[in-house]
């Protein structure tokens, strides 16, 4: 009398794949209670075992946990074309080939779900798609890479250099052996491309996301920042502007009252702002295998429970690149009269106004640390160019963005 | 060629009702894009206008924004029995009559959704039901009443007395003319009954929630607490125990590192803990009319988009009342030798160990402020009884729960 079980084809048996298979067995009863159908594993494809076509033939639903774009892309496309809903945790695949995948899912009339691809245990994909699906989202931003948040928190707490803290993160398992995509911002950029697409219902590809990493952050930037009441985060920001959107990833100082300022260690946090909701902040640990598997299972249950429509973009918004930002500015200059005046003049000429200054002598030189109010980034770049050419400069000027806004 | 519009019957035209009608008109296009069907208002029932039966007859879906249990309960039951899905923001109705309403919805095979009933703009109902629907949730807790959080934040910041801050909250619109249900914890208790039901898949009624309010909080409790690094919140906690659950609301001190400690002003924040997800924290402003209307619209879209199953409880867990807690303890005692020893002996006899003490002389008396480690609440109550009977006491002992656990 009970309906047929739902047969799940699992692609990949790494950390997340194994955790998913275990969780599926453990929670099969709960899945049946929630969805009315009992799940069972129809087969698992690994590098050395199993045949994709055969597993697809035996499955009602495909879970893709291989990672990377090849052969994951081909498998997901085949599965969707064969009318099988797909759950994936693959952020690179979605950020690079989202349009193609969503298009094929739409044609085939099946679901493609991907909660596990973004922001660890935080169910941000569901919240943006479903809770805020008809809301005019103004901004989605946050800390979407736990590795870099751990590194920046440790640097601020201990004063240690970037390389030393990275080594420690690797020992603790918070950073991979090859941490490149985490520390240079590429991982966060992929996640922001996905979130921007969902929030603004417009196609966004990875190539349109401007990103910077944390490799250049110096301990003394963090020390000066502490005096100014600032903490440093690698932020991803997707924002609506007049006539378009911007999607960017960069290290950024936050004032102490900001909801993201207390988020430290290997955590993720995402904020959504919209007139109809004001703002919502969601935070939690960056995901390990079990947490990712749990997000994948949530998507499986959602597919079994109902026939939500295939995600559609509704518009094509241009990406705006020259936006306004505040900046922290660190200058090493000769300690002689008139230097501050010259720098202030360059800023003034570029219509940039100064919010705060800390100056301190170091041997024959002086360090000048400033925060400037919001200005067009192109103006700031022009000012930095001019300042860099002053003969009083001892080294290239350094700058980091700042979120100025003060919260409740 | 486009499908028939979906006709929505709106019950109530107060602040939220009006905001919903406006938002529905404004976002009709977005609703159609998300769900495939264009919404239109079939009629609005107010105290003086409209006939419920007639509006029901013309509607595909009912939105209940009257509030209170009568006549809201009868209308919602009639609508469900007539096969109409219902969206409501009515926490009292769900907390008091949830079993009956969910039972009728199940029989009729239609949805009853209620995101707007709990925690302002935070989509906690959807996240618990859908993202964590098959997760073994250990604990759901947080700040679910913005009025009391505003009052406690203001008392801590200004040192002002409860009554003065309440008056200010009323001026600012953060407290109602009759604030009773907010300040005595009843409003938070209704929300926690709803959340506990969802998280643990077990029936929980309002009568099973033990609650205390903030009316007795004194400015000097907050002043002493600051010295100990604590901040005070009105917390709702629903927790799984061996053999059952507990659901409670009480004022509680938090250490500075706790994720809920920085949540100040008229904000809500909810944490979900489970082995498979570790923890997720969600926060945002307590809802005004527009925010509540936005949550209602999200539910409408979800109903239009799919046929999610009717919410089912899966078990009946007993409510455990004697649980372990830490406590802050404030005693005014005669300033003479041996008093601390007597108090310490009473605590020791009840197997309660002390974590920290602050003692200070005030005229001929002394104030003794302690934090004790976790103990069974019945033991603590026995110790308080004994201490209250000591001749050295100048006034009745005061106590407030503390969350001891220190976070990342």
Image (cartoon, coloured by chain):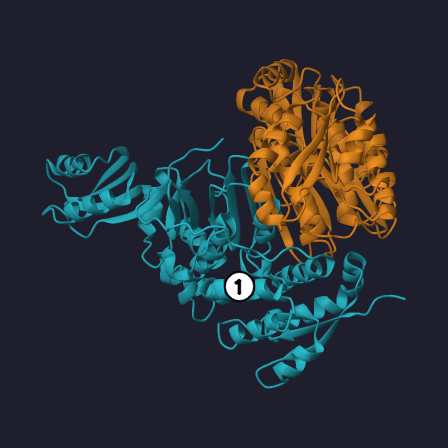
Chain colours: A cyan, B orange
* Chain where mark 1 sits: A
Answer left or right for A12 relative to B344: left
- Taking the image as shown, residue A13 lies to the left or right of residue A270, namely right
Q: Residue B188 location, x and y as percent?
A: 72, 32
Residue B208 visible in image: no
Between A309 and A249, which is closer to the camera in this rendering? A309
In this figure, what is the number of numbered marks? Answer: 1
Q: Which type of secondary structure does the marked residue at label 1 adopt?
A: helix
Report the side of A95 relative to A382 (left or right): right
Q: Is residue B158 above or below residue A251?
A: above
| Residue for point 63% across, 30% down | B21
Residue A86 drawn at (x, y percent)? 62, 67
The answer, for residue A119, to whether it is visible in the render is yes
Q: Residue at x 81, y 34 (%)?
A: B76
Q: Which residue in the protein does label 1 denote?
A: A103
> Vertical placement of B374 versus B252: above or below?
below
Image x and y of residue B328, in percent: 68, 32
CA neighbours of label 1 inside 10 A, class few (<14), some (14 to 19), many (20+):
some
Give the farthest residue toward the right.
A1
Residue B91 occupies quadrant = top right
- Residue sticking out furthest to the front: B1
Front residue of A43 and B191: A43
Comparing B287 with B266, the one in front is B287
Say which quadrant the N terminus of chain A sits in.
bottom right
Identified at 80% across, 60% down, the residue is A36
x, y percentage for residue A146?
A: 49, 57
């Amino acid at each position: 009398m009970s309906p047929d079980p739902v047969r799940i084809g699992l692609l990949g048996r790494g950390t997340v794949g194994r955790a998913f298979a275990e969780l599926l067995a453990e929670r099969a009863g709960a899945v049946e209670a929630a969805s009315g159908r009992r799940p069972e594993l129809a087969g698992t494809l690994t590098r050395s075992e199993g045949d994709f076509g055969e597993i697809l033939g035996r499955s009602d639903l495909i879970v893709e946990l291989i990672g990377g774009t090849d052969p994951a892309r081909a498998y997901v496309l085949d599965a969707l074309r064969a009318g099988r809903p797909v759950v994936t945790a693959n952020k690179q695949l979605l950020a690079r080939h989202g349009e193609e995948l969503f298009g094929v899912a739409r044609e085939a009339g099946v679901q493609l779900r991907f909660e596990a691809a973004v922001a660890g245990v935080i169910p941000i994909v569901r919240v943006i798609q479903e809770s805020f699906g008809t809301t005019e989202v103004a901004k989605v931003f946050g800390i979407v890479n736990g590795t870099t948040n751990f590194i920046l928190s440790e640097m601020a707490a201990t004063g240690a250099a970037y390389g030393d803290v990275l080594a420690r993160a690797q020992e603790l398992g918070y950073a991979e052996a090859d941490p490149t995509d985490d520390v240079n911002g590429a991982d966060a950029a992929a996640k922001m491309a996905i979130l921007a697409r969902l929030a603004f219902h417009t196609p966004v590809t990875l190539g349109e996301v401007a990103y910077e990493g944390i490799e250049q952050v110096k301990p003394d930037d963090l020390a000066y920042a502490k005096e100014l009441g600032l903490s440093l985060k690698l932020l991803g920001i997707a924002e609506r502007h007049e006539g378009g959107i911007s999607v960017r990833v960069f290290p950024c100082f936050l004032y102490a009252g900001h909801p993201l300022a207390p988020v430290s260690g290997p955590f993720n946090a995402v904020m959504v702002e919209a007139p109809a909701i004001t703002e919502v902040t969601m935070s939690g640990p960056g995901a390990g295998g079990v947490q990712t598997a749990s997000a994948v299972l949530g998507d499986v249950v959602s597919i079994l429970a109902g026939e939500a429509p295939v995600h559609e973009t509704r518009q094509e918004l241009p990406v705006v690149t020259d936006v306004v930002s505040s900046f922290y500015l660190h200058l090493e200059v000769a300690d002689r009269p008139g230097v501050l005046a010259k720098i202030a003049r360059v800023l003034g000429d570029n219509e940039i106004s100064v919010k705060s200054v800390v100056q301190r002598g170091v041997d024959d030189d002086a360090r000048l640390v400033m925060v400037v109010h919001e200005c067009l980034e192109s103006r700031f770049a022009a000012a930095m160019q001019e300042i860099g050419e002053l003969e009083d400069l001892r080294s290239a000027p350094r700058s980091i963005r700042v979120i100025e806004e003060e919260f409740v």
